[in-house]
Amino acid sequence: MGKGAGFVSGSDRHMDAVALLSELGLENAKQAASQLSRILSLKSEVEYSGDKFSESDANEMLTRVERFFNWAKKVLPPNILSS
């Protein structure tokens, strides 16, 4: 997303993308940043905790990712999403 928009984050931390997103001034960016934050938190829980990912967790993740993607399709130029 960043590279196609004319900027690149030098950070290795995923959560820095949340802060950057909330500062972009895009429509509903703060809400989208909140969705992204929860998506990344769920990802980290699954990746690092060793706990099993329940069907309920998977459904929550899917719902949040779909919401975030639909927001991105609405506010970002098409060439950014296809990059």
Image (tube, helix red, strand yellow):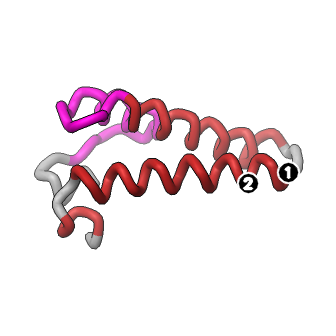
Give me the residue at 22% from left, 47% from top.
8
Which quarter of the image is occupied by the C terminus?
A: bottom left
Query: Label 2, on which residue?
Result: 58
- Please provide the residue range marked out in magenta: 8-30
Secondary structure of residue under mark 2: helix
Q: Which mark is residue 20?
A: none
Q: Tell me whether the residue at label 1 lies in contact with that at label 2, contact meaning CB atoms closer than 8 angstroms.
A: yes
Q: Is residue 1 above or below residue 35?
A: below
Image side of residue 82 versus residue 40, left or right: left
Give me the residue at 30% from left, 59% from top.
73
Rendered location of residue 10, percent (x, y): 29, 41
User: Could you tell me the amino acid type at mark 1?
Assistant: Ser
Residue 62, quarter of picture: bottom right
Secondary structure of residue under mark 1: loop
Rendered location of residue 52, percent (x, y): 88, 50
**As rendered, which of 28 and 46 lies closer to the eye?**
28
Image side of residue 46 versus residue 39, left or right: right
Query: Label 1, on which residue?
Result: 54
Quick check: is 21 in the magenta stretch? yes
